[in-house]
Image (cartoon, helix red, strand yellow):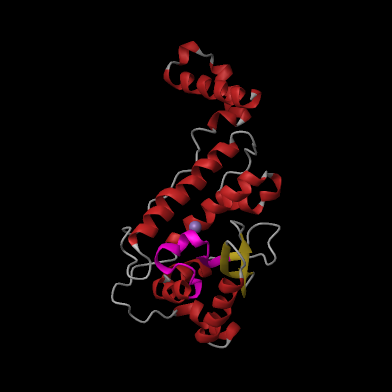
Amino acid sequence: MSERRDFLKKTALFSLGSIATSLVSSEQIQALEKAGESFSLLEEYTLPPLPYAYNALEPFIDMQTMELHHGKHHQAYVTNLNKALQTTKHPEITSLEELCKNINLFDTAVRNNGGGHYNHSLFWTLMKPNKDAQANNPDGKIAEAINASFNSFEDFKKHFNDAASKRFGSGWAWLIADNKKLKITSTPNQDNPLMPMAEERGTPLLALDVWEHAYYLKYQNKRGDYTNAWWNLVNWNRVNELFSKI
Ligand code: MN
């Protein structure tokens, strides 16, 4: 409780300072800024807007699932991450990616909610509408790399679907780049391949949420049907963009 009180007091002091500097000395504000703690509220994580409408991924992912998944589940990860970071401070870590890479410095609440925020923020950008159910195959550099690493797109999909179906309980399936090498892996809960404890580590290029909340309303227990439908939505331009930064 004392830590929380301390945090609130410092935040209040800083807010007050920015409105009416005459009430708080500039030395006090500088000291708070230096401590890095006064910025906790100013640098809170926020829910990124979806890059498309809630119903845009139909018929493959339904509107109600997207509303709950983004508006409730992802929002809860953001809210709980901000809450957890009020008591666990590493001011030198400012990006979500750095947070994941150094997640061993934090408690379980930051691991679960920080992972949840990173994973979902990435996941939304890796999908795009495909109302007409057009064939959706990779192109460009990522298509070449997939063929070189997995023989063909069909073989790659089989491996990836396998990772998604064999992940017991809640988790994620991933395509990652470990330096230039492509690998398929999966993680439990809200862990991801940036985290030091991941079985396979690397830069995420493609992610599939296989938590039941991602598909249960439309697909019930049929995770395989959801996975097959999801391939219609993969945003290969975004995957290429991530791959080009490796
Ligand atoms: Mn999810």
Residue 2 visible in image: yes
At which x and y percent is residue 176?
Answer: 59, 69
**Residue occupying the point 63% across, 33% down:** 87
**Residue occupying the point 58% across, 80% down:** 159
Q: With respect to residue 38, does 73 lie above or below?
A: below
Residue occupying the far left of the picture: 132
At which x and y percent is residue 76?
Answer: 48, 45
Q: With respect to residue 151, does 94 lie above or below?
A: above
The number of numbered discs placed on residues in the rendered structure image is: 0
Write down the region rendered in magenta: 204-224
At which x and y percent is residue 154?
Answer: 51, 86
Residue 246 visible in image: no
81 and 138: which is toward the camera: 81
**Residue occupying the point 47% across, 23% down:** 15
Q: Which quarter of the picture shows residue 191?
A: bottom right
Say whether residue 89 is magenta.
Answer: no
| Left or right: 11 in relation to 101 | left
33 and 151: which is toward the camera: 151
Say whether residue 217 is magenta.
Answer: yes
Q: Which quarter of the picture shows residue 187?
A: bottom right
The quadrant of the image that shows the C terminus is bottom right
Q: With respect to residue 14, does 149 lie above or below?
A: below
| Left or right: 131 in relation to 166 | left
**Residue occupying the point 52% across, 80% down:** 157
Q: Which quarter of the picture shows residue 156?
A: bottom right
Residue occupying the far front of the picture: 221
The quadrant of the image that shows the N terminus is top right
Residue occupying the far top of the picture: 23
